[in-house]
Image (tube, rainbow, N blue to C red):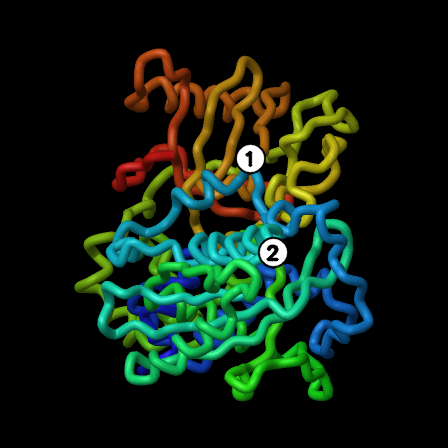
Amino acid sequence: MEEALTRQEILHSLYSMGVELPPATKLPDEALNSRLDDAIKSCQELPDILPSPASSTLRITSLGDWPSGRLKVAKAIDRANLGEVAQNSMLNPELQGSGVDVLGDLRYIVHGFADNWDQKMKAFFLNDPDDQQTLTIALRIVHIKRIDDSTPVLTVLYSTYTPEAVSLAEAWDDEQADPATGQPPTYMKTTLIQQKALLRILKFNSRYVPANFHPDRSALESDFKVSYIFPVGPLSFEALGKLNLDTGCAICGSRTVKKCSQCYSVGYCGPECQKQDWKNHKQSCVSVKGGTWRTIRVSSCLPGTSGMFASDMNQLASTRRPFGPMTQVDGTSPPPNIHGSRVFLIKLQFGSSHLYIYDRKKSMKCFFVKDNTNREVFDEFLVEMQRSPRVMHDGLKMYRWAKREGDWDLSVCLDKLPLETIRW
Ligand SMILES: [Zn+2]
Ligand SMILES: [Zn+2]
């Protein structure tokens, strides 16, 4: 039984986190695995919550117990935020074939562990009886410690069983039944990819367990492994920006030195790979060549609102305290750049004296404000918008290709329409 994620499953997992590698990427397995490790680190916000240097171990016994009863672990372990709906909708339909949102499922499973702990259940049995190939995972929460008020950490013992060894797993299942009530471990139905993803995180996190830490275990648990479970959330825009930086040559995975000059959305190591890919790529290549490009200066808030308070700013900047207090509108920081120098789609919406501009992930939300210096360009956009097909009562809006030219300058292709159907 193969417990490791396959290459396709790694790509799928990365995609479910928002890391968009081309499905046919030739990046070597090693590079894919290290990108997944970086993503695993970031979705648990480990650089933020582990004592520095982040690579060192976490001395779990030096932490206090999570105060039982007072603070529900299930509530503290959830990492949610307002931007998620937008983020989830970007899942590639091609990769959705297997019907799995790997990261979302993982968060659901972690929530399940915490929720059961709150109800005094500590042992779990995970498999899918409908799937002949499935693994069985046995997992027991040893204790839950407190890193801070919003960050519990679970210490777990776990093992995997192949279908042939399932009687051993059942012996453990019996052993873990509550002596008072006879209640068996909590059963969680999980698909193989969900199990593999969980095992991947447990394996990754085990590097933080000090070698001299030996939690008490029963005889049946003698070869169980020890690991930690931290809260799991969506990747922040900062992490997404880094993870999406170099996605490699679409054919061979080497470092990219040139982009398709028509659409800028795919990169190659050189002309040979580009030539080889053309038969495939020409179907999706959207021609923006020959389009009229305008560079506009954007601002991160409307005039006069800098310094005011709002709750909808930088929603994915950090997920640790998702629904924190209202934050001050910061007109001085440029919108984050997760696209690098790539061409990406933006949506432009017309307001009386400005255009509101954002990308699909809402990583950048900015304004193009009409003033005396840009009246002509502003009106060009307005005319273009009035010509664009639109839904009745939906206001003036359009989708266009854009490219960051710097912190505050955005180059927008005025007159070439994206060919794909856009649903955001
Ligand atoms: Zn190449
Ligand atoms: Zn192209």
Quadrant housing the N terminus: bottom left
Return the residue nearer the eye: 28 or 51: 51
The label shown at residue 120 is 2
Q: Earlier in the sequence, mark 2 or mark 1?
A: 2
Q: Examine the image and state in which quarter residue 253 appears.
A: bottom left
Question: Residue under circle 1?
Answer: 296
In the image, residue 98 sits, relative to residue 53, either above or below, namely above
Q: Position of residue 47 (x, y in %)?
A: 69, 65
Q: Residue furthest left?
A: 279
Mark 1 element type: strand
| Number of numbered discs on residues | 2
- Check disc 2 and give the amino acid type: Lys
Residue 28 appears anywhere in the view? no
Residue drawn at the location 60% of the way across and 49% of the way down: 74
**Is disc 2 surrounded by few (<14), some (14 to 19) or many (20+) residues within 10 Å?**
few
CA separation in Å, label 2 and label 1 = 58 Å
